[in-house]
Image: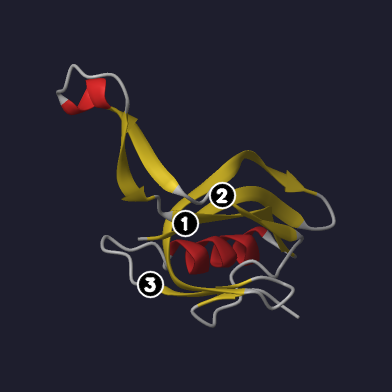
Amino acid sequence: MSSSFKGLDLFGSGPHRFSVGPRGQLITANFFNGGGDAGSTLQGLIAWQVVVKGRLVAASEAALNALREAVLAQLEATPTPGDLVDTHGRTWSGMSFVTFQEGDRVDRGRVWSVSYTATFLHL
């Protein structure tokens, strides 16, 4: 099974893995809310975070750039939520693609590749 975001296979060109960030309540110290009291206040649920780490892999530099452009085209000024599906079929609905960070170098050999970290939030 392949992974997808909004039905697009953005990361399937190379190895990649999904990890889920912490879930629960955002708690702030009362000191930071303008109060002098000791203690903490619940602010509500934190945004769910799913991180995809892997490598974009292509046969040429031009093909690698096309993969990059396909991923970057999904980053929007106002993110449109969609379904994020991992390689095991687990689905996170209503996820927004918020950041894409490439590795510090492109590796060249029989194939061209670059590492990346992509972050999705449930806003």
Residue 96 image point, x, y percent: 41, 64
Q: Nearer the viewer, residue 34 or 91?
A: 34
Determine the CA span between mark 3 and mark 1.
13 Å
Mark closer to the chain start, 2 or 1: 2
Label 1, on which residue?
48
- Residue 29, given in percent of the width and then of the height, sits at 31, 26
The outermost residue toward the front is 38
Q: CA distance from mark 2 to mark 3?
A: 18 Å
Residue labelled with disc 3: 81
Residue at 74% from the left image edge and 74% from the top image edge: 88
Rendered position, 110 above or below 67: above
- Identify the image's colour scheme: rainbow, by chain, secondary structure or one colour: secondary structure
Res 21 label: 2
Q: Secondary structure at mark 3?
A: loop
Can you tell which mark lies on residue 88?
A: none
Q: Specify the amino acid type for callout 3.
A: Pro
Pick the quarter of the image with the C terminus. bottom left
Q: Quadrant of residue 54?
A: bottom right
10 Å neighbourhood of mark 1: few (<14), some, or many (≥20)?
A: some
Dot 1 amino acid type: Trp
Residue 107 x/y as whole percent:
74, 45
Question: Which structural element holds mark 1?
Answer: strand
